[in-house]
Image (cartoon, rainbow, N blue to C red):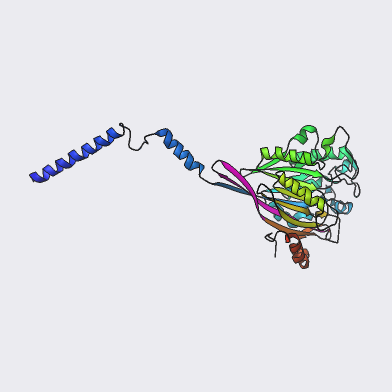
């Protein structure tokens, strides 16, 4: 018994001595605290900086909203105009993306100044209401018909777009309005939108009002892209260019798209040919991949036959990665949903209206981007 007591006393003395030694060696600090708190915090910051942060959004775009008289006459009601029946069949597809863009080719100046059709368009303002209801977030107004009915039509359109909360780009109310690059932020990703046209059918804005429409000017485009890059994660540029009714891009489209890509754009959306042209990836000298749709065709219009009644919904993902203090953005997962304008100017999925054309259109659109996802 005495021996057991001696052993216990020895263990107690050993443990006490060990604790005393540890306390002396740490200067009396708690064992749970680091010796150097500043160093410890630096280590934590480095570990946190090594965490990868990923976010992703989807962007959809449709082509020309070109409202001929036969279209708005078909939409007339006892109380005005209703274009929703024309878009109802594709509304669910248009609403899927986080951001949806449309090329509003005819100015929605409204009935107060008289509606009109080709060659000098003015459309009902209810066109804008239908686009808004269908999920469109922003429209381009830079095209060859921007000045068809003068400044009054544009002022009416700007007023209505603002009233319904629709962003517009490419044509502006004032110099101050033009200076505000349009951006949309979703899930920590900010996307900027710019738009330009090759011309306005020989009509020029007053010399003191150049803000009424953005013309294609390389120097201006490069400057605008640079400014847009400083306030956004991705830059989308809408271009009204190309030859009407030609199913392949011309040299001007190819060269200008390469310039825009090298200037810093991430996505290029083409309009004006009124028929679909293939999509392509442009590999830039700074190792980026820029997606270009040379022409998205007519989405809703009064034009028929020879591919002028076929359009579609282009969808892309924009992915943002933060790692070790660096942020990178890339465009991925391109897909295309072909559409067809039926009798009564009803926009329907192509695989429902003209399934016999689906393979041809799919092959046409994906010939330069084989991974383009299309409906089977």
- The tally of labels here is 0
Image position, residue 85 (x, y; %): 78, 55
Question: Furthest residue to the front?
Answer: 285
Asked if residue 36 is positioned above or below residue 235 in the image, the reply reads: above
When asked about the image quadrant of residue 113, the answer is top right
Q: From the image, which quarter does the C terminus lie in? A: bottom right
Image position, residue 328 (x, y; %): 61, 45
Residue in view at x 25 percent, y 37 percent: 19
- 290 or 258, which lies in front? 258
Left or right side of 349 for 114: right
Image position, residue 181 (x, y; %): 73, 38
* Residue 22 visible in the current orientation: yes
Q: Is residue 201 magenta?
A: no
- 14 or 112, which lies in front? 14
When asked about the image quadrant of residue 247, the answer is bottom right
- 325 or 362, which lies in front? 325
> Magenta region, mostly helix, strand or loop?
strand
Stretch of the chain drawn in magenta: 307-333
* Residue 271 visible in the current orientation: no
Q: Is residue 308 magenta?
A: yes
Left or right side of 73 for 85: left
Left or right side of 331 for 163: right
Question: Furthest residue to the bottom?
Answer: 356
Image position, residue 275 (x, y; %): 82, 57
When asked about the image quadrant of residue 6, the answer is top left
Asked if residue 257 is positioned above or below residue 340 in the image, the reply reads: above
């Amino acid at each position: 018994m005495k021996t057991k007591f001696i052993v216990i006393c020895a263990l107690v003395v050993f443990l006490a001595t060990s604790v005393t030694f540890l306390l002396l060696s740490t200067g009396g600090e708690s064992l749970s605290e680091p010796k150097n708190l500043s160093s410890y915090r630096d280590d934590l910051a480095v570990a946190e900086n090594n965490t990868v942060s990923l976010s992703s959004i989807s962007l959809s775009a449709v082509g020309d909203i070109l409202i001929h008289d036969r279209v708005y006459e078909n939409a007339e009601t006892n109380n005005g105009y209703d274009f929703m029946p024309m878009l109802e069949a594709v509304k669910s597809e248009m609403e899927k993306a986080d951001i949806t863009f449309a090329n509003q080719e005819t100015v929605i100046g409204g009935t107060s100044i008289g509606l009109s059709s080709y060659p000098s368009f003015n459309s009902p303002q209810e066109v804008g209401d239908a686009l808004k209801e269908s999920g469109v977030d922003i429209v381009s107004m830079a095209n060859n018909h921007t000045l068809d009915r003068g400044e009054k039509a544009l002022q009416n359109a700007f007023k209505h777009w603002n009233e319904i909360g629709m962003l517009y780009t490419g044509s502006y109310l004032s110099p101050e309005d033009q200076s505000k690059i349009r951006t949309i932020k979703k899930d920590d990703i900010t996307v900027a939108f710019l738009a330009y046209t090759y011309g306005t059918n020989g009509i020029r804005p007053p010399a003191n009002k150049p803000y009424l429409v953005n013309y294609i000017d390389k120097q201006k485009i490069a400057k605008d892209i640079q400014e847009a890059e400083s306030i956004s994660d991705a830059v989308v540029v809408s271009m009204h260019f190309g030859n009407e009714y030609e199913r392949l891009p011309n040299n001007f489209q190819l060269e200008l798209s390469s310039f825009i890509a090298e200037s810093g754009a991430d996505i290029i959306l083409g309009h004006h040919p009124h028929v679909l042209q293939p999509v392509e990836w442009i590999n830039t000298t700074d190792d980026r991949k820029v997606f270009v749709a040379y022409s998205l065709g007519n989405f809703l219009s009064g034009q028929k036959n020879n591919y002028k009644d076929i359009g579609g919904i282009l969808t892309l993902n924009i992915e943002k990665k933060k790692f070790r203090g660096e942020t990178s953005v890339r465009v991925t997962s391109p897909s295309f949903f072909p559409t067809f304008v039926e009798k009564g100017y009803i926009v329907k999925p192509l695989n429902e209206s003209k399934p016999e054309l689906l393979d041809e259109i799919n092959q046409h659109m994906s010939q330069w981007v084989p991974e383009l996802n299309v409906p089977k």
